[in-house]
Amino acid sequence: MRAMSVECLSYCGWYCKRCPDDTCPGRRAGAGDPGCSMRECAKSKDVITCAVCGEFPCAIIGPVLEEVSLLASICEGIKEHGTDKWIEEQNKLVDCKYDFS
């Protein structure tokens, strides 16, 4: 069974529930760049997030991971713990009002 908050997990790995903008519908609901190459690639390969793709890290997300170390850590956490477990842990942090900044 898929975690209920998977709609809050963007294709690149950001977790939208961590965002302070509670008016944003989230990346899966169309927020952000509609032509995002990571989004298009993940959707075409039918993967929940780039971190679980068999080609991860690829030429599309690799350069981003090199520049954004936090995103690299997030993707490694998803790979290590699995999507559902990682989302569960993120929800616990959000619920306890953890300061992500």
Image (cartoon, rainbow, N blue to C red):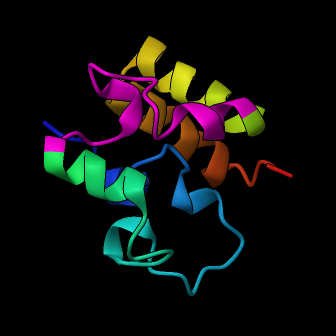
Q: Nearer the viewer, residue 3 or 49?
A: 49
Residue 24 inside the magenta-drawn segment: no
Q: Quadrant of the N terminus?
A: top left
Q: Residue furthest bottom?
A: 23
Give the residue drawn at x 46%, y 23%: 57
Q: Nearer the viewer, residue 67 or 17?
A: 67
Q: Is residue 42 left or right of residue 8?
A: left
Give the residue drawn at x 22%, y 39%: 47
- Is residue 39 visible in the rendered structure shown here? yes
Above or below, comparing residue 50 to residue 41 in the picture = above
Q: Residue furthest top?
A: 80
Q: Is residue 31 left or right of residue 47?
A: right
Q: Residue furthest front?
A: 59
- Is residue 4 visible in the rendered structure shown here? no
Looking at the rendering, the stretch of residues picked out in magenta corresponds to 45-66
Residue 38 percent across, percent down from the top left? 40, 51
Give the residue drawn at x 56%, y 61%: 17
Quadrant hosting residue 56: top left
Q: Nearer the viewer, residue 48 or 68?
A: 68
Residue 67 percent across, percent down from the top left? 76, 38
Residue 15 percent across, percent down from the top left? 53, 51
Q: Is residue 32 left or right of residue 4?
A: right
Give the residue drawn at x 28%, y 58%: 40
Residue 62 inside the magenta-drawn segment: yes
How many numbered marks have been drawn onto this rendered protein structure? 0
Above or below, comparing residue 9 to residue 55 in the picture = below
